[in-house]
Image (cartoon, rainbow, N blue to C red):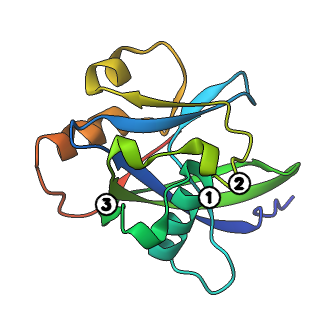
Amino acid sequence: MTTSMPPLREAARAIVMDADDRVLLLRYDENQGFWATPGGSLQQGEDHATATLRELGEELGIDENEKAIELGPQLAERTKDHLVGGREVRQVELYFLARVSAADVDPTRAPQPDNIRAYRWWTLAELRNTQQTVHPIGLADLVATVAAGRPLKQPVVLTG
């Protein structure tokens, strides 16, 4: 018996942090509810960095033209099989650091809020101590590394 692999879906995600090293997460209701980083799939011919900037504009209402986003290096990657629009895909996500001012985030200007139910800035302590579901697993450790100013030799592989 052979099993086929789901179609590949490439995605770009941002670990959005402010000057106080808080991380911005988005709340979704599906799958009993969870918090996750902003991002989404690449469009035809788009690279991951460009997709990250576009997604931040679409989901957070940050105006790309104002240069409000300081896009940093790729910090992590994750591969996960899950349903998108009712069909199973193998999503490969690259996570980039994005530094923004909390004042530049304006969800009322977001043209594609993608079923986002809430926006919240989390401190590292809140992220480590929450009982709520946060994706990806390992995000708190990655945020701690960035907040401490420790450079990564290569992107971390995340799960969950």
Image disc number at residue 155: 3
Give, as a three-letter code, the residue at label 3: Pro
Pointer 1 with pointer 2, Cβ within 8 A: yes
Residue positioned 42% across, 38% down in the render: 24
Q: Residue 157, percent across and down?
A: 39, 53
Q: Is residue 33 above or below residue 153?
A: above
Q: CA distance from mark 2 to mark 3?
A: 28 Å
Q: Which of these two is toward me, 92 or 73? A: 73
Sequence order check, earlier mark of 3 and 1: 1
For this view, does 104 lie left or right of residue 39?
Answer: left
Q: Secondary structure at mark 2?
A: loop
Vertical comparison of 74 with 160: above or below: below
Which residue does the numbered mark 1 point to in the structure image?
58
Quarter of the view holding residue 36: top right
Q: Quadrant of the N terminus?
A: bottom right
Identity of the residue furthest to the bottom in this view: 45
* Point 37% across, 27% down: residue: 122
Horizontal side, residue 64 vs residue 73: left or right: right
Read off the residue under disc 2: 112
Q: Tell me the crowding category of disc 1: few under 14, some 14 to 19, or many 20 or more residues within 10 angstroms, Cα based.
A: many
Residue at image point 35% right, 14% down? 129
**Would you call the spot at circle 2 few (<14 residues within 10 Å), some (14-19), or many (20 or more)?**
some
Q: Determine which quarter of the picture holds residue 147.
A: top left
Where disc 1 sits, the SS reads helix
At label 2, which amino acid type do we have? Gln
